[in-house]
Image: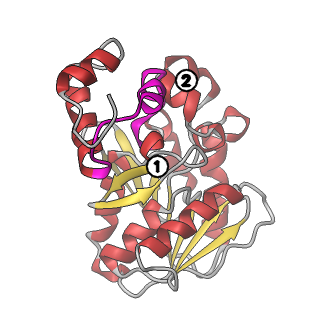
Amino acid sequence: MAGMDEATMAEWSHWLGERYDSGELNAMRRFWKEEQGGAPSEWQWRRLQAGEPLQYVLQKAWFMGRTLQVNPSVLIPRAESEELVEWVLEDPAIRGQACLDLGTGSGCLGLALAWHGSCRPVYGVDCSPEALRTATGNAMAWGLEDSFHGLHADFMEADWVPPSAPIWISNPPYIATDEGPAMESHVLDYEPTIALFAPQGQPLLVYRTLAQHFLSNEHAQQFWLELNPRWAEACLGLWEDCHVTLRDDMQGKARMLRVIKP
């Protein structure tokens, strides 16, 4: 039932109860109420029923207390990425520093640092023109259009030259090929493969390439990375002569890495 009236919990259960449990439905209904109001149209119910993420249907997602535009060209921001940003914000030295956001996607990491930590300017690098358009739109919506610079580039290329920035952050594609079958269908079917799966299916190759860029760049000083927990320990040895700290996420998984040059 579409219209201005809110959909009842019974309606959400009728349409989506076979796919989601009551806790998930409550969260979805609350998010819909806050961001859209009214009830989903039948077309929107059908999309949700097919497993399309609610954030793509609404074209909105929450990150660090603010709304971001999202679409199938970018990943839906996760709570683990918020944890990574919160860790960076613990360091007051980032204020006034330029930031390089590698694989920026929606721009969530770099824009959150600019908004909450005055880490500006932000250089958002992505190999997807569609993702860069999304990130640029989010920068404008947040009033950060003068602080965000989208750069079309592939950081996996050995001869790529990063812009000058002391603060680096990245949630790179880090899923190995053999991990795909265990993933939820709504992620595999709808979120961008290029942002999920590591090139050549090798997460360690991604982290090794990022380490080479970071270590060879004279301006780079600190690097915060989101990790595939399966490869976290192997990543520790990639940063010659640097101070490296591994941190668990809220689920107790080794998810975040901080690297500081001497």
Q: 134 or 237, which lies in front? A: 134
Disc 1: CA contacts within 10 A as few (<14), some (14-19) or many (>=20): some
Instruction: Tell me which amino acid carries mark 1.
Output: Gln
Asked whether residue 37 is drawn in magenta, I would say: yes
Question: What residue is shown at x 28% (from left), y 15% (from top)?
Answer: 14
Q: Position of residue 157 (x, y in %)?
A: 78, 57
Residue at 25% in and 28% down: 24
Residue range (magenta): 35-55
Q: Is residue 210 above or below residue 235?
A: below
What is the quadrant of residue 233 in the picture? top left
Residue type, numbered disc 2: Glu
Q: For the N terminus, which image quadrant?
A: top left
Please name the residue that numbered disc 2 is placed on: 179
Looking at the image, which residue sits at the far front? 3
Which of the 4 image quarters holds residue 199?
top right
- Which residue does the image show at 55% across and 80% down from the upper left? 165
The residue at the point 48 percent across, 49 percent down is 236
Queried whether the magenta region covers residue 251, the answer comes back as no
- Nearest to the eye among marks 1 and 2: give it: 1
Q: Horizontal placement of 39 versus 156: left or right?
A: left
Q: Secondary structure at mark 2?
A: helix
The location of residue 25, given as percent across then percent down, is 25, 27
Q: Closer to the camera, 199 or 184?
A: 184
Residue 17 is situated, as x and y percent measured from the top left of the image, at 29, 15
Q: Which residue is mark 1?
A: 59
* In front of the other: 226 or 213: 226
